[in-house]
Image: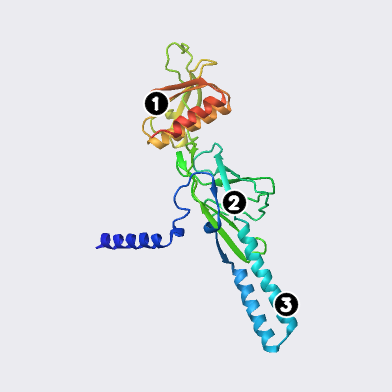
Amino acid sequence: MDAAMHGERGNLVARIRSWFPALERGRSPEALPIRLDRRRIYIVPTRAGLGFAVLLATMLTGALNYQNNAALLLTCMLGAALASSMLLTWRELHDLTLRSLHADHGFCDARLPIHLAFADDGRARPGLHIALDAIQQPCPLRRGVGRASVTMPTDTRGWVPVPRMKLSSTLPFGLFRAWSWITPNQHVLVYPRILRDDRPRQRNNDPNERIAGSDEFASLRDYHAGDPIRHVAWKASARHDHLLVREFDSAAPGQPLRFDWNALSGVDRETRIARLTGWVCDAYAAAHPWILILEDRRPLGPASDAAHYHRCLTALAELP
């Protein structure tokens, strides 16, 4: 019964969309460049515009009732201004062309900057707003400058599609709102979220790179799932009412840190990726060389430059 009702509802929606193709416009991804022509722009009066229209109707009724020519002239002039403002609001979006877009590097759960490049048609659009979610972001375009920047929300890592964006304007008087939809067929790379609740083990398991007798106590930290039981500091844990683990520095001076996927046990997949991401960010900030061992035991590095940093984060973001 429920399936039949859902099927009938879907057929009804498809039929309505076939009757009104404009309802489907802006929902399907489109290749750039995208131009906003007159058929893609919608315009309705705002609350202020509706109030202004009621005021004009009241003035017109009073002017005709009392045969007051001055009031009738004022009403006609205000009505002309209302019609002109509707045209000016519509022109804010008309012929606007999105040529290209690119994204900065950003991490999951943070807003990712998106840079938009519009075609310069010699017109200023000071009232342009762009929204990729519920947040309206002002993006005024000056004459001769066709670039604007917005931010998009991110809740997943990897290559994600750019969401449908709403372009709108209420200039010049806020009496009308014009808007249009653009869904660019573009994907942007989002790095994994950063988890910094644990310090990486600096132990280098390569016998050719280890220094004999170099296991030195470094510090105490909270116990995490997967830590060896032999490293638990039982006396210190009894004093603090929770488990503490001894950390040892065994990497030789100048030797790269090793961030091994397979060394993280007892945690789920996304937590592993987030923890490795945090370690990579910390090592890059400290300018310390590191090696990232991926799930398939493929090593990346050693290095400590920006190219290696972005290569590691891209590999982590693209993990299935």
Q: Secondary structure at mark 2?
A: loop
Q: Nearer the viewer, mark 3 or mark 1?
A: 3
Q: Secondary structure at mark 3?
A: helix
Task: State whether residue 317 is above or below residue 251.
Answer: below
The 10 Å Cα crowd at callout 2, few under 14, some 14 to 19, many 20 or more, is: many
Task: State whether residue 1 is above or below residue 201.
Answer: below
State which tag comes first along the sequence, 3 or 1.
Answer: 3
Q: Nearer the viewer, mark 1 or mark 2?
A: 2
The 10 Å Cα crowd at callout 3, few under 14, some 14 to 19, many 20 or more, is: some
State which tag comes first along the sequence, 1 or 2.
Answer: 2
Which amino acid does the dot numbered 3 rest on?
Leu
State which tag comes first along the sequence, 3 or 2.
Answer: 3
| Residue placed under numbered mark 1 in the picture | 263
Q: What separation in Å lies between label 1 and label 2 (alpha carbons)? A: 53 Å
| Residue placed under numbered mark 2 in the picture | 96
Which amino acid does the dot numbered 1 rest on?
Ala
Residue 238 shows in the view: no
The quarter of the picture where the C terminus appears is top left
> What residue lies at 26% left-to-right and 59% top-to-bottom?
3
Task: State whether residue 309 is above or below residue 146.
Answer: above
